[in-house]
Every structure is written in C-alpha cells, then in structure tokens.
Amino acid sequence: MMKSLIGPQAAAYGRRPAGENILVVEPDEDLREDMRLHLKLAGYQVATAEDGVVAGHHVLHHPTDLVLARDRMPYLSGEELAAALRDEYPKLPVIVLTRTLLPDELLETVARELELFGQLH
C-alpha cells in the first residue's frame, strides 16, 4: 500500500496544469484511493473505477486524458480494456500496471506519458 501524503509532503509533488483528467482503474479499494490521492495532490483531476466495465462507461461520458489500469481485474483485464479503448479512442493513452507503483514512480510515469502524448499530438 502507498504511504499517505499529508501536510508539507504534498508540496514536494508540485502542481500540474488543470485539465489533465486521469482515470484510475484498480479493483482494490485501498490502492485505488491511494493512487487517487497522490495524483490529486500533484494537481491532476482524478476519477476512479473498480473495473474495466465501469472504466469504459466513464470514458464514454467524461473527458479523459490518460487511463491507468491494473492488469488483472474482474470482467476485463487491463490489456482488454486498453484494446477496447484503442479501437474507439486511438489517441487516448492507457498505461497497464503490472505491479503497484511507489508514489514517485506513479507520478513520474503519468507525467512522462502525458508529456510524450503531448509531443505526439
């Protein structure tokens, strides 16, 4: 489980521009909330889903700039979700997580992917 951030620790994360909407798809409620908290403290707009079906509905109805999905989930795996989203939203970056990332790794991965995505489009 990720260590929670409180007080001055959050300031070390810096602030991201508004409008970067991240969808975290994680079946474990505690991990999902930890990821949401760390991304929110870094300045991202964060939505969550507990599985690939809920995530698919979310993307249909809400602006999403990046999806972070666990590889093993009920109903749809992270890879299946990524393939389905790629068919409908070919420019939407999807990161499939095969392990739990430390908070710094999570933020670096998201920032790198959004930067790469911005350079390509």
Image: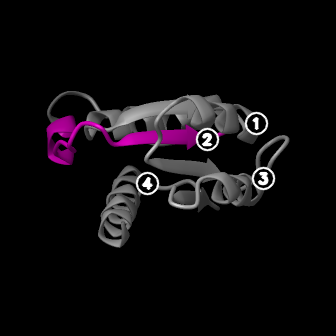
| 19 or 5, nearer to the observer | 19
Q: Label 3 neighbourhood size at 10 Å, few (<14), some (14-19), many (20+)?
A: some
- Tell me where residue 90 sits by quadrant: bottom right
Q: Label 2 neighbourhood size at 10 Å, few (<14), some (14-19), many (20+)?
A: many
Name the kind of residue labelled 3 in the image.
Ser
The tag earlier along the polypeptide, 1 or 3, is 1
Name the kind of residue labelled 2 in the image.
Val
- Tell me where residue 39 sits by quadrant: top left
Q: Which residue is mark 3?
A: 77
Q: Label 1 neighbourhood size at 10 Å, few (<14), some (14-19), many (20+)?
A: some
Relative to 33, is 118 on the left or the right? Answer: left
Query: Most extreme residue toward the right, as rendered?
Result: 75
Q: Give the answer, above or below, for where 89 lies relative to 20.
A: below
Q: Secondary structure at mark 1?
A: helix
Quick one: quadrant of the C terminus?
A: bottom left
Disc number lying in front (4 or 3): 3
- Is mark 2 in CB contact (under 8 Å) with mark 1? no
The residue drawn where x is 25% and y is 37% is 43
Name the kind of residue labelled 1 in the image.
Val
Relative to 51, is 69 on the left or the right? Answer: left
Q: Secondary structure at mark 4?
A: loop
The magenta-colored residue range is 9-26
Q: Label 4 neighbourhood size at 10 Å, few (<14), some (14-19), many (20+)?
A: few
Q: Which residue is mark 4?
A: 102
- Is mark 4 in CB contact (under 8 Å) with mark 3? no
**In whole angstroms, how far apart are the C-alphas of marks 3 and 2?**
10 Å
**In whole angstroms, how far apart are the C-alphas of marks 2 and 1?**
10 Å
Q: Which residue is mark 2?
A: 25
Image x and y of residue 100, in percent: 56, 54
